[in-house]
Amino acid sequence: MTSTIRFLRLLRRLDRRGRSRAPFLAVACALVAGACGYAPTGYAAAPLHEAAGVTIDPVGDTLGAGLRQWDITRLAVTQQTDSTVVELDLTATVITRVAGDSTGLLGFIDFDIDQDSTTGRQSAVDSYRHDGGSSGMRAEYTIVLGNVAPDSSMSVADVNFRSVGRVKPRIDGARLTFRVPNALIGAHAGLLNASAVVGATGGPSDFAPNTGHLATHD
Ligand SMILES: [Ca+2]
Ligand SMILES: [Ca+2]
């Protein structure tokens, strides 16, 4: 099976699950303050490391035959009191899939919240790369960039690709910023690993880091 077909089938499967769980998610959003919004408040902050990590990705290292060659330049993760802030920088102004644009951004941002490469599922980067390399991480949670609701929020999926909530990104030109409530992605202590793969209809076009993964540190 080609990577393009696997990419699209996975997205369709996630989309179906997101829709089928919509009533449950609506209830969850009502019950859990901040679980599905951009600026969470109202839940006790876990003791966190004030950790951060960043990886710079080359310009022009795209691959595949997608309709849009989205090109990552930077992935950064910063821990705040109650949330994990993720910045994904690209070489072009971000266009999401909210309008059904086939060149809109697809992809996944994976989190390995226990920094344990023996737990979780295969990272999306390793599912789509063709260079024989490895991210060296497995993932417990994932932001699904292609699962965009009319309010522009995107799905957060767990290790079994079940949606656990939604986060609304901020778009500043070529930068996509997520503020993910820590309550949404498990009881991690601020130290985590991350990696990302992006693409459009037709398949993935870039991943970051090109080798290994981003790891936050004090
Ligand atoms: Ca790149
Ligand atoms: Ca890359």
Image (cartoon, helix red, strand yellow):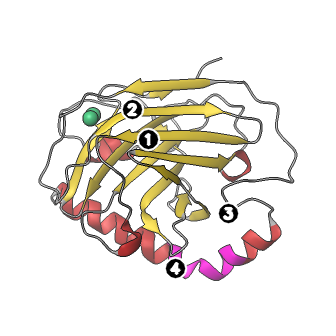
Disc 3 packing (10 Å; few <14; some 14–19; many ≥20): many
The answer to whether 16 is drawn above or below residue 3 in the figure is: below
- In the rendered structure, which amino acid carries the disc numbered 2? Arg
- In the rendered structure, which amino acid carries the disc numbered 1? Leu
- In the rendered structure, which amino acid carries the disc numbered 3? Cys
Q: Give residue 89's quadrant in the image.
A: top left
Counting residues from the start of the chain, the first of labels 3 and 1 encountered is 3
* Relative image position of residue 132 (x, y in whole percent): 20, 32
**Residue indicated by mark 4:** 19
**Residue indicated by mark 3:** 36
Quarter of the rendered image showing ligand 1 = top left
Q: Is residue 20 magenta?
A: yes
Q: Give the Cα distance between marks 4 and 1.
A: 26 Å
**Residue indicated by mark 1:** 88
* Relative image position of residue 119 (x, y in whole percent): 53, 39
Counting residues from the start of the chain, the first of labels 3 and 2 encountered is 3
Q: Give the Cα distance between marks 3 and 2.
A: 25 Å
Disc 2 packing (10 Å; few <14; some 14–19; many ≥20): some
Asked if the residue at tag 3 contacts the one at tag 4, i.e. Cβ–Cβ closer than 8 Å, the answer is: no
* Relative image position of residue 21 (x, y in whole percent): 59, 77
Residue at 46% across / 68% down in the picture? 148
Relative horizontal placement of residue 97, taking residue 179 as reference (left or right): left
Which quadrant is the N terminus positioned in?
Answer: bottom left
Provide the major secondary structure of the magenta segment. helix
Q: Give the Cα distance between marks 1 and 2.
A: 6 Å
Callout in the foreground (3, 2): 2
**Residue indicated by mark 2:** 74
Asked if the residue at tag 2 contacts the one at tag 3, i.e. Cβ–Cβ closer than 8 Å, the answer is: no
Counting residues from the start of the chain, the first of labels 1 and 2 encountered is 2
Residue at 82% across / 70% down in the picture? 31
